[in-house]
Image (cartoon, helix red, strand yellow):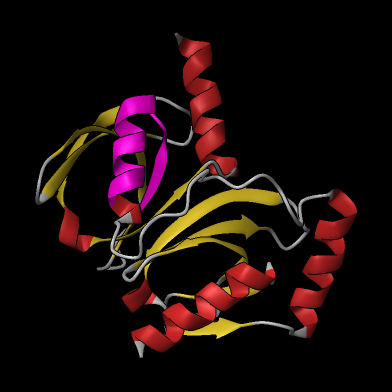
Amino acid sequence: MSKFIVDKLIGFQERKELVAIYANPDADFHYAGYIEAVTKLECLFRVISENGEANGYWTIPIESIYQLETNTLAMHDVLVLAKHRGTEHTAPFLEVQLKKKYSLMEYITDLSKIEQLVLGVELFDDSESFYGYVLENVEDAIEFQSFDVDGRADGVIIIRKEIISSYTFKGEIEVGIENKRKKTF
């Protein structure tokens, strides 16, 4: 099924089509937006909020995608608002086309370490997500400097890569944390 999903995601990307992605079969929660990049294993998604505003990016493994939707009535409303706000099409986050075997999660992990980019880290076990940037990235684990939503350092978290389900970044919460951090330094 994942090849089918990958092919559909690539089609959505090529057509610049608004799509909703569900990552939990038991929840009504989803992200709506545009596909930025697709590899064999992962997808980079530019999130558009319900009111049509750009709200950062989401990197998710293909295996975590349970449902895709496009052309729904609710998405039509989001599309109208996005067009009105000018967030329908923006400059791409990635300037190059990645090879299908490349890991978007590793790319974002490395970017977080280099630029101290705050990530929202979501876990497969549905425990609370956390926010932070990467201090160290090794083969099977990542060390994060964690922050609360007010931008205060909240300890160090070391976590196995295999339990990270997705990253969000450059969204309202992550940018808010980064801005609050800058004010305290």
Judge whether residue 146 is colored magenta: no
| Magenta segment boundaries in residue numbering | 106-121
Q: Is residue 140 left or right of residue 68?
A: left
Residue 141 on image: x %, y %: 12, 47
**Residue farthest to the bottom, as pictured:** 1
Q: Is residue 9 left or right of residue 103?
A: right
Q: Residue at x 40, y 55 (%)?
A: 98
Q: Residue at x 47, y 20 (%)?
A: 181
The kind of secondary structure the magenta stretch mainly shows is: helix
142 to 18, vertically: above or below: above
Judge whether residue 111 is colored magenta: yes
**Residue farthest to the left, as pictured:** 139
Residue 49 on image: x %, y %: 68, 58
Residue 58 on image: x %, y %: 48, 56
Q: Is residue 167 left or right of residue 12?
A: left
Tell which of 123 and 4 is nearer to you.
4
**Residue farthest to the right, as pictured:** 84
Q: Residue at x 62, y 63 (%)?
A: 34
Q: Is residue 55 left or right of residue 73?
A: left
Tell me if residue 26 can be seen. no
Tell which of 19 and 184 is nearer to you.
19
Tell me if residue 184 can be seen. yes
